[in-house]
């Protein structure tokens, strides 16, 4: 008998809508500090300045910015904690 185990990826969601710079980034940093390496964090923000913030942050911190999206003024970032 063959058993297949599916690994479901756990993504931690962080809703920082309504917060302005630098709060979305500070809250994301705090969340990442509490995570295990390789875990993923989805940040949902409404601050237009967060686009540049998260881009620069991922370059400087070593955390991977896997994707960014914008939909009607809501910005979503998917980060992976560095190993």
Image: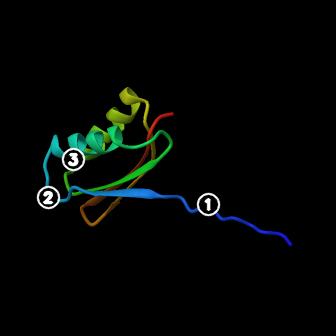
Q: Say what secondary structure mark 1 lies in.
A: loop
Q: Quadrant of the N terminus?
A: bottom right
- Choose between 60 and 4: the one closer to the eye: 4
Q: Which comes before the other along the chain, label 1 or label 2?
A: 1
- Residues at discs 3 and 1 in contact (Cβ within 8 Å): no
**Height in image: 63 above or below 4?**
above
* CA gap, disc 1 and disc 2: 34 Å
| Residue 7: image tag | 1
- Residue 71 falls in which quadrant of the image? bottom left
Q: Which residue is mark 2?
A: 18
Q: Say what secondary structure mark 2 lies in.
A: loop
Q: Say what secondary structure mark 3 lies in.
A: helix
Left or right: 1, with 16 as reference point: right
**Height in image: 47 above or below 21?**
below
Q: Which comes before the other along the chain, label 3 or label 1?
A: 1
Residue located at (33% from left, 37% from top): 33
* CA gap, disc 2 and disc 3: 9 Å
Left or right: 11, with 13 as reference point: right
Q: Which residue is mark 3?
A: 24
- Residues at discs 2 and 3 in contact (Cβ within 8 Å): no
């Amino acid at each position: 008998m063959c058993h297949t185990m599916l690994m479901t990826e756990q993504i931690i969601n962080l809703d920082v809508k309504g917060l302005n710079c630098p709060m979305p980034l500070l809250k994301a940093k705090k969340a990442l500090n509490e995570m295990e390496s390789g875990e993923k964090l989805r940040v949902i923000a409404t601050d237009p300045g967060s686009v540049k913030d998260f881009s620069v942050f991922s370059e400087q911190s070593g955390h991977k910015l896997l994707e960014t999206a914008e939909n009607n003024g809501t910005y979503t970032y998917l980060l992976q904690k560095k190993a």
